[in-house]
């Protein structure tokens, strides 16, 4: 039983202040938020597979460098965008979002970088989150200022969003970057760079340099400001970044014979909640719809009575692909390459493809799961293609998939990209798409987008794909390896709210100790060292663990047992108060946990994300080849913002 199920069961059994789940849903969709917003959008009433999914690899969506300097000028600004959402009266709604782009306009997601291996990219990032008069914009979402965030740091408490603006910092996720360009959460900048984070030493770099000295891969860029990453990304600050090389060129004549544009598609999959008028909605107050579903411990109190609170996790009830709700793509009967990004806050997707009749909008009459090839992941091509029909897809990760629409049995049909992952924390098990423990009634998140096989085959462009051409990743060298033990915890903060934490093995006390973000670094690999990290998950849920700077090889997993000590660890909070975390004892590691092809895991590629499953030791191997201050963290954005992040200091 995972944490959410346990808390739900005990809260209901104890008569806690929770209404029945079905009643809560009915109330939520009928509850007015305020006079300007109106009601929540009901996802069951929104159109499915009507909007065309924008392709982030469309040539018209690729950033262009300045023709004279070669520098990319990228702005963060506010805009209005149509997602396909309809109001109750059937008219199209417009959504205010934050996007990346240029002085000509910004979008959610931001335009795509497409760069060449070993050729430097220089980017000038500008925070333009101001109104036309130059005054700072308020955040689109409620900000919990009791959290450990940019303007709570020593020497920064005199700043505020109202006076100084929203801090941001762009992180190139998967980039092999020098530390000052990595997007460390304490390298933030306000609009106009009037306030910069403490790690800048008083000044911010005006131009970021990315060396691109890595194999071709599917990276992405997103905001990473301390304590508000979840909010800035939710507002729209994310986009793709592709590295190309001599093999994976992105051209039709590439040596690997991979599908290329227009048969190479890039899709960022996210989830959101919307008000009926189109505004983004994010539960943050005790009277908000779904508050009781996300604040899982009903004894927890918000930091300020009536004020906003951070959430344990967030699951949206509308699926969004490249800024469009439940879109579709019209395809030819041939192989397509899909570069997929899980850009959600907390949602583990479990992806399948199933055929339905033309025009169908649900899976009621869908056929069996169809096979597809996984040819790569986060930072490059796999060691070999894997034929699968189910793929576990963790938040923050990317997968490189080839699907064959040419089967004559599929002619004229619609293929739905299905999600059998639940609307709740992921424990590693899946299979029931309509899990009764999910809290969305008439759940619509079991489908992501659709593909209509409706276009004629273009005889001018050959379809030569064959899975045998994929053979790239051979792992990370094991020469001179040292071992490091780290851990994942779930404790409580000073308000009694769930607080996920990282930790490390302490040789002095022979115990695992939970460590909040602000304590001195404990993960300090030496420059050019190779380490194997054994990640112990002492929580009830899976966590997608991300290391900056490196790519790594996933070596395997082992089950373990432990007992919870009678005395909890005291956890010093950023404001001098204390929370608590469990003290694991009597840890016994068993044999390998088999996660083969039948389990939906594709991990034979260079990764920067790994799913650490509960009560398992997950082992990865990486080489730390640049010095400086980086970070490692859980990529559930609500977790990293609430202390599940630590400094990674390469010395």
Image: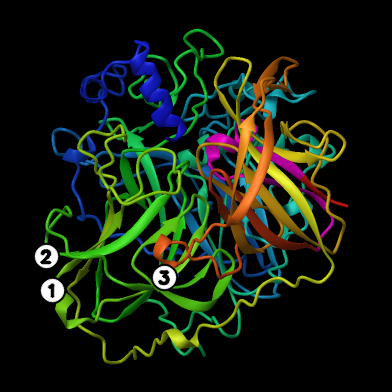
Residue identified by numbered label 1: 412
Q: What kind of element bears circle 3?
A: strand
Query: What residue is shown with label 2?
Result: 358
Q: Position of residue 40 (x, y in %)?
A: 27, 28
- Chain part drawn in magenta: 625-647
Q: Nearer the viewer, residue 347 or 108?
A: 347
- Answer above or below: position of 316 versus 387: above
Image location of residue 18, percent across then percent down? 33, 15
> Does residue 340 sit above or below 275 in this rendering?
below
Residue drawn at 47 percent across, 90 percent down: 253
Precedes in sequence: disc 1 or disc 2: 2
Query: In this image, 248 relative to 257: left or right?
Result: right
For residue 401, the mark is: 3
Q: Dot 1, how many residues are within 10 Å of its Cα: few (below 14), some (14-19), or many (20+)?
A: some
Left/right placement of residue 477 relative to residue 541 reads right
Q: Quadrant of the N terminus?
A: top left
Q: Position of residue 520 (x, y in %)?
A: 83, 35
């Amino acid at each position: 039983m995972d944490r959410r199920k346990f808390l739900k069961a005990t809260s209901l059994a104890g008569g806690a202040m929770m209404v029945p789940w079905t009643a809560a849903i009915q109330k939520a969709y009928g509850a007015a938020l305020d006079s300007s917003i109106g009601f929540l959008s009901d996802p069951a009433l929104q159109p499915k597979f009507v909007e065309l999914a924008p392709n982030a690899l469309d040539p018209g969506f690729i950033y262009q460098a300045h023709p004279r300097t070669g520098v990319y000028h990228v702005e963060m600004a506010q805009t209005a965008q149509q997602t396909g959402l309809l109001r109750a009266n059937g008219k199209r709604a417009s959504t205010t979002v934050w996007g990346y782009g240029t002085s000509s306009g910004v979008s959610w997601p931001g335009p795509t970088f497409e760069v060449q291996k070993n050729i430097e990219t220089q980017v000038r990032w500008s925070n333009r989150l101001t109104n036309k008069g130059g005054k700072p914009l308020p955040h689109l979402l409620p900000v919990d200022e009791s959290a450990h965030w940019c303007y709570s740091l020593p020497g920064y408490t005199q700043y505020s969003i109202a006076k100084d603006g929203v801090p941001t910092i762009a992180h190139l996720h998967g980039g092999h970057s020098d530390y000052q360009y990595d997007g460390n959460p304490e390298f933030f900048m306000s609009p106009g760079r009037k306030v910069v984070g403490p790690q800048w030493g008083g000044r911010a770099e005006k131009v970021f340099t990315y060396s691109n000295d890595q194999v071709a891969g599917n990276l992405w860029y997103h905001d990473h400001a301390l304590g508000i990453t979840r909010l800035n990304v939710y507002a729209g600050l994310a986009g793709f970044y592709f590295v190309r090389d001599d093999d994976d060129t992105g051209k039709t004549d590439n040596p690997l014979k991979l599908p290329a544009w227009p048969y190479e598609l890039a899709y960022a999959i996210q989830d959101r909640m919307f008000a009926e008028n189109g505004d983004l909605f994010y539960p943050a107050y005790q009277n908000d719809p779904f508050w009781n579903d996300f604040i899982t411990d009903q004894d927890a109190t918000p930091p300020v009575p009536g004020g906003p609170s951070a959430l344990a996790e967030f699951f949206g009830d509308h699926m969004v692909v490249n800024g469009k709700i439940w879109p579709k793509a019209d395809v030819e009967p041939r192989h397509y390459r899909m570069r997929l990004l899980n850009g959600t806050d907390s949602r583990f997707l479990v992806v399948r493809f199933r055929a339905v009749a033309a025009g169908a909008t649900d899976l009621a009459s869908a056929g069996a799961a169809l096979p597809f090839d996984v040819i790569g992941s986060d930072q490059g091509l796999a060691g070999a293609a894997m034929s699968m029909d189910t793929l576990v897809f963790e938040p923050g990760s990317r997968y490189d998939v080839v699907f064959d629409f040419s089967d004559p049995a599929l002619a004229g049909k619609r293929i739905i990209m299905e999600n059998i992952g639940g609307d709740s924390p992921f424990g590693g098990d899946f299979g029931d798409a309509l899990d009764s423990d999910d809290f969305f009634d008439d759940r619509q998140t079991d489908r992501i987008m659709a593909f209509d096989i409706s276009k004629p085959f273009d005889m001018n462009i050959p379809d030569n794909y064959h899975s045998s051409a994929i053979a790239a990743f051979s792992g990370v060298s094991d020469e001179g390896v040292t071992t490091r033990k780290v851990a994942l915890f779930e404790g409580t903060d000073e308000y009694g709210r769930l607080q996920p934490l990282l930790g490390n093995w302490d040789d002095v006390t022979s115990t695992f100790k939970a460590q909040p973000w602000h304590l001195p670094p404990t993960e300090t690999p030496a420059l050019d060292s190779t380490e194997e990290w054994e990640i112990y998950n002492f929580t009830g849920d899976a966590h997608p663990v991300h290391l900056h700077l490196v790519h790594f090889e996933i070596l395997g997993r082992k089950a373990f047992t432990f007992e919870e000590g009678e005395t909890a660890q005291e956890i010093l909070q950023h404001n001098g108060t204390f929370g608590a975390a469990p003290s694991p004892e009597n840890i016994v590691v068993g044999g390998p946990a088999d996660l083969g092809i039948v389990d939906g895991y594709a991990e034979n590629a260079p990764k920067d994300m790994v799913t650490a499953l509960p009560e398992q030791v997950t082992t990865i191997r990486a080489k730390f080849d640049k010095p400086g201050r980086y970070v490692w963290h859980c990529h559930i954005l609500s977790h990293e913002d609430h202390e599940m992040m630590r400094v990674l200091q390469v010395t």
